[in-house]
């Protein structure tokens, strides 16, 4: 796994010298560069000079407190990541910190482990965002270049096309293109893109124009899939300009490789790289959406935690490579025995968390029992018997992700206590 924290810079602001020196040593070890300051004024000047990725600051300090310093910093860089460390637990401080949209609020004495873990999590998001922004800049460069394929057309026929356009569709001339495709609409596929044949036709049926349709979309939505003469699918960014009332100029910029890179970056941000399952961040986002549906429509919602029994023994006996294979095997089996609407994420180590929308507790138990049996059938000659213990709970009014996880975890503990390889629920 990349050491994301080693690629970021940190500003640490703390007025107590011994505290600052102690934590500075720990922060220096995990970051690319660490800058320190002993009050808000010095901290603000330091931020202006070095523009660090993350600011870790005490709140109550002489000359300028941490809250005022962060307000000033946010005016310079609104997206900077901020962690407050403070000995004060008054709600007024917490509310002001929330208003400033900071990423962390840690009470002193701060556990160095908790602080470094939060910084590593933030660092990962920062680096992935930077990579994504770099891809956007590359995309912008391509848009501004003259390498795109172009066509002048109206709905019925093409009147002019660049050589690269004709070559892409395997024709020698505009006349041959018009004879083959009959309409510019037919170059678009029926992939799940915003610009596809079905969406264009629906828009035209409402007396809209192709220009209005494409022009109304944002940049991300204007990326579409087009199949070439060799039946290869490629991604293009579509730009359109009006020439007159009937004709328009369309530019197609090949962004296939950038789209692949963007998809890879998105996958890294949302998935566990070993099992391919969602990671915690993505699971939390999906849970928030499902919770909003529950509150709006009153649907049932169940949540389960699954844990591989005696997983440590597999690692000790066969090594971590075998352990990794078992994790992947279990992940794939859980996918195969759940529904497309269900969400499975790797929660850490040998634990998985499962979100079952529109599923009452009794139905969730039946589904998990089916999964348990499928896992039990994974008995292999090489590794022996593989089993899973499940703890499951259902949403009740006022629940949060934390409260549901806590009940599911208690149910899982009970399943382990009762002998493992079983499903236990807790209301």
Image: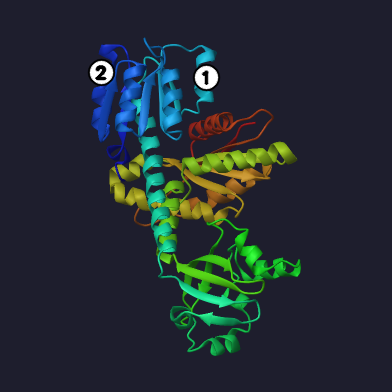
Q: Residue 333: horizontal and vertical position, in percent?
A: 49, 54
Quarter of the picture holding the C terminus: top right
Q: Residue 296: horizontal and vertical position, in percent?
A: 72, 39
- Residue at position x 56%, y 48% from top? 343
Q: Given contact means CB atoms under 8 Å apart, are the residues at marks 1 and 2 in contact?
A: no
The disc at residue 22 is 2
Above or below — where is 383 with respect to 103?
Answer: below
Above or below — where is 213 with respect to 276?
Answer: below
Q: CA distance from mark 1 to mark 2?
A: 27 Å
Look at the numbered disc 1 and give the secondary structure of its residue.
helix
In the picture as drawn, the residue positioned furthest to the top comes out as 62
- Residue at position x 40%, y 35% from top? 122
The mark lying in front, picked from 1 and 2, is: 1
Q: Residue 74: horizontal and vertical position, in percent?
A: 45, 29
Q: Residue 400: horizontal and vertical position, in percent?
A: 60, 31
Look at the numbered disc 2 and give the secondary structure of its residue.
helix
| Residue identifier under label 1 | 96
What is the crowding at mark 1: few (fewer than 14 residues within 10 Å), some, or many (at least 20)? few
In the picture as drawn, the residue positioned furthest to the front comes out as 244
- Residue at position x 41%, y 16% from top? 59
Above or below — where is 42 with respect to 178?
Answer: above
The disc at residue 167 is none
Q: Give the side of residue 39 with respect to residue 102, left or right.
A: left
Judge whether residue 349 can be spotted in this image.
no
Say whether disc 1 or disc 2 marks the residue closer to the N-terminus: 2
């Amino acid at each position: 796994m990349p050491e994301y924290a080693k690629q970021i810079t940190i500003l640490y602001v703390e007025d107590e010298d011994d505290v600052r020196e102690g934590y500075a040593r720990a922060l220096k070890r995990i970051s690319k560069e660490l800058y320190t300051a002993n009050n808000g004024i010095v901290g603000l000047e330091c931020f202006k000079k070095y523009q660090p990725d993350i600011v870790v600051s005490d709140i109550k300090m002489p000359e300028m407190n941490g809250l005022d310093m962060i307000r000033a910093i946010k005016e310079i860089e609104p997206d900077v990541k901020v962690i407050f460390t403070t000995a004060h637990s008054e709600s007024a401080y917490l509310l002001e910190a929330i208003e400033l949209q900071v990423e962390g609020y840690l009470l002193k004495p701060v556990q160095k482990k908790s602080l470094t873990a939060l910084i590593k999590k933030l660092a990962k998001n920062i680096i992935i965002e930077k990579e994504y922004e770099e891809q956007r800049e590359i995309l912008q460069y391509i848009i501004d270049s003259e390498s795109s394929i172009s066509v002048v057309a109206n709905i019925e026929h093409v009147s002019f096309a660049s050589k690269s356009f004709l070559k892409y569709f395997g024709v020698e001339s505009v006349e041959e293109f018009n004879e083959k495709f009959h309409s510019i609409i037919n170059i678009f596929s029926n992939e799940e893109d915003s610009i596809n044949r079905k969406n264009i036709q629906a828009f035209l049926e409402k007396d809209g124009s192709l220009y209005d349709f494409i022009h109304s979309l944002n940049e991300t939505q204007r990326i579409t899939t087009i199949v070439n003469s060799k039946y290869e699918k490629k991604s293009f960014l579509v730009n359109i300009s009006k020439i007159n009332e009937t004709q328009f100029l369309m530019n197609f910029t090949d962004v296939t490789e950038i789209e692949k890179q963007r998809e890879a970056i998105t996958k890294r941000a949302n998935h566990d790289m070993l099992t391919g399952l969602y990671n915690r961040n993505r699971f939390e986002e999906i849970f928030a959406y499902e919770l909003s549906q529950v509150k709006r429509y009153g649907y049932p919602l169940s949540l389960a935690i699954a844990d591989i029994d005696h997983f440590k023994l597999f690692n000790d006996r066969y090594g971590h490579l075998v352990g990794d294979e078992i994790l992947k095997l279990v992940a794939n089996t859980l996918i195969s025995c759940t529904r497309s609407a269900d969400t499975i994420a790797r929660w850490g180590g040998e634990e998985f968390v499962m979100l079952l929308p529109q599923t009452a507790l009794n139905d969730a138990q039946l589904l998990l029992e089916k999964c348990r049996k499928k896992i039990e059938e994974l008995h292999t000659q090489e590794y022996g018997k593989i089993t899973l213990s499940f703890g499951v709970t259902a949403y009740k009014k006022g629940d949060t992700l934390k409260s549901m996880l806590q009940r599911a975890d208690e149910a899982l503990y009970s399943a382990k206590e009762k002998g493992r390889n079983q499903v236990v629920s807790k209301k």
